[in-house]
Image (spheres, helix red, strand yellow):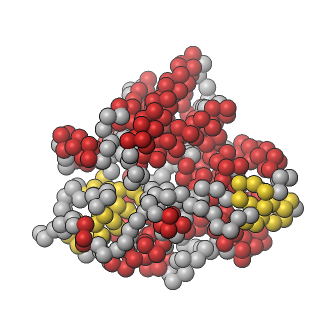
Amino acid sequence: MATATPKASESGTAFEPLSRAFAQNPYPAYAALRDKGEPQFFPDFDMWLVARFDDVAGIARDNSMVRSPEFFMSEEEIIEQKRRQNWLDMPHHQRFVQFSMLDSDGDVHDRLRKQVFREFTPAFIARQRGMIQSFVDKLVDGLIGKGEIDFVEDLAAQVPGHIIGRVLGVPDEDCPQLRVWSERVVQFFDINRSDERKALAEQATTEFYHYLLKLMAERRTAPQEDLITRLMAAQDAGLLNEDELVSTCMLILMAGHGSTIDVLGSGMHALLRFPDQMERLRQNPGLIHTAIQEMFRFESPLPFFHRYSTTDCMVGGKAFPRGTKFGLLYGAANRDPAAFGEDAGSFDVARNPNRHLAFGGGAHFCLGNHLARLDMEVIFITLIKRLKSISLAEAEPQYKPGLSVRGPKALRLTLTPA
């Protein structure tokens, strides 16, 4: 079987995900990769970038494609790979972040996922609506008379973390600090892995860990009706150990922060860039469900994940050997005209069907997607009902740099009450 040999020169595509131009508009670069047809080698991450919808979906849903290299690398080889990627010498990050439900596979992943899945049922999520509505109403009460706000900081960043914090059992007053830790931990997953960013990630993970130990000790003394108490009961039943419990709590809190904040910001920006769609939603609020799905498709908040092949495989008509690392460009796949038609680059609040890949696929499909969508539904419907108009108060919002995130740094808005 002929196999592809990674060569940095193989791709003639300029792909610079740390550039300002890419941050503002990555879609020309994504389109160029899709037009190549087959995966393109990206030396910065020593991986093959996959941009077409069918190829990305096929890998994401294939159980032979895994997150961890342990299925085909020795422990020594994994350590050497981590050394090259500057992932070593950060004990708490390695213990609780580099190992998690997200980055495990097989029986370990299935066991941990089962403990979380049994909690995040549709019925449980639906019961959170009243709590979310009350929280959002209070926030909007304090913002509606200000005239101008930063939507990202003043509203989007205040909701997801507090809601997932309440579900887990974190006091409201601690949620802002959890957001800081989450952002400092997650930033080290992107391309820039400098020693400075490494130290920041390790320090945040360490502080996060000690906070969770304190919270767990409190629950031992006084159990409550919250997720951390129930996960601790699963630990007592031998279904997960303490490190897995801490790692899972960190993952839930981190997943409940950044990506939802980002898609709230980019979703609002999309409504403002396409004012006919904003008006369409105002006239028919029942479109909120398809509108939110379109926000995830149009600006995927987590536009990149990786997989390793555990077998020789064919991707995009090209042969690859066992152990190949693929970079799944969800942001590129979700704008693929082959999957979404010639209007794939347009924002349509009524798009249906909309089988986007923003939540991933297969064994690693996002467990928190129902809660994220409920947060968004409540926020956008509340704003539409209570505001006569919403407009941009700046010429062009700046988006975050990097390959692994997609969202505006800030979004200055002018609000006119109804």
* 395 sits to left or right of 226: right
* 20 sits to left or right of 123: left
Give above or below for 49 relative to 176.
Answer: below
Q: Nearer the viewer, residue 411 or 329?
A: 411
Q: Quadrant of the C terminus?
A: bottom right
Residue drawn at x 37%, y 72% is: 14
Q: Residue furthest bottom?
A: 342
Q: Nearer the viewer, residue 9 or 59?
A: 9
Residue drawn at x 75%, y 73% is: 279
Residue drawn at x 58%, y 52% is: 260
Query: Where does residue 232 sit, x and y in percent of width and height?
Result: 49, 27
* 12 sits to left or right of 335: left
Q: How many marks?
A: 0
* 370 sits to left or right of 309: right
Q: Quadrant of the N terminus?
A: bottom left
Query: Where does residue 17 sit, x and y in percent of width and height?
Result: 43, 63
Q: Residue furthest left?
A: 1
Query: Where does residue 214 sit, x and y in percent of width and height?
Result: 53, 22
Give above or below for 111 relative to 336.
Answer: above
Is there any visible trace of residue 248 in the rendered image? Answer: no
The image quarter containing residue 388 is bottom right
Residue drawn at x 55%, y 24% is: 215
Give above or below for 179 relative to 269.
Answer: above
Query: Where does residue 92 sit, x and y in percent of width and height?
Result: 39, 31
Q: Nearer the viewer, residue 292 or 414?
A: 414
Is there any visible trace of residue 294 in the rendered image? Answer: yes
